[in-house]
Image (cartoon, rainbow, N blue to C red):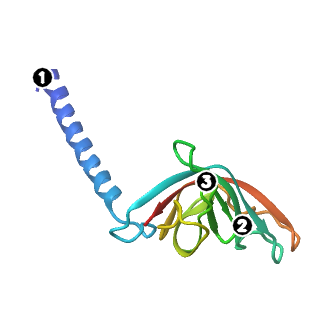
Amino acid sequence: MSKRRNIRAVSIIGAAAVAVAASAVTLSASAATPIDPPAGSTKVGEWAVATGIQTYTCANGTFVGTASVPEALLVDAAQQSPLHHFAGPSWQSNVDGSTVTATKTAESPKAGTIPELLLTVNSHSGPDGILTPVKYIQRLNTSGGAAPTRPCTTGDRESVPYGATYVMFK
């Protein structure tokens, strides 16, 4: 085989391998995960953490395994509909006052950071607004916020910065 034919053959095989790999990525990306909202859910909006902390309270000499309390300002892409995320967990629109609380339905652990979550809204309050139709909340693209692993004294509190994207569905 000539040098030119060898290069052509390697190029064709390489292109085929890339096409197979790309289709595998497409298939796996479209597969449902445990943190997806139920089929038929419609996206209401998406907000990113502008500033946020997860606060842990030490129990029995460790922060690990204790529930965290969030405190965050969330912004949409246009930074026009900010949300306040706080204990509950709760989300409140800083524009219209609508508020939801939710409970964890599923989680997807991520090494070195807080897990990604699916939460189910269990209460609505305040005036009708952007959060009124919300039934499910995803916490995605998490970074930071993991519980400290050092020993501690029961009752100690520590706040850890975090980032995430919250996607809300009706």
How many marks the image carries: the answer is 3
Name the residue beneath numbered marker 2. 69
Regarding residue 105, the answer to whether it shows in the image is no
Task: Determine the CA span between mark 1 and mark 2.
Answer: 67 Å
* Residue at left offset 82%, top offset 78%: 60
Give yes or no for contact between labels 3 and 2 (Cβ–Cβ under 8 Å). Answer: no
User: Quadrant of the image for the N terminus?
Assistant: top left
Q: Residues within 10 Å of mark 2 (few under 14, many from 20)?
A: some
Name the residue beneath numbered marker 1. 2
Residue 95's disc is 3
Give yes or no for contact between labels 1 and 2 (Cβ–Cβ under 8 Å). Answer: no
Q: Is residue 25 above or below residue 103?
A: above
Instruction: Please name which of the two marks, 1 or 3, marks the residue nearer to the observer.
Output: 3
Give yes or no for contact between labels 1 and 3 (Cβ–Cβ under 8 Å). Answer: no
* Residue at left offset 23%, top offset 48%: 20
Q: Amino acid at mark 2?
A: Val
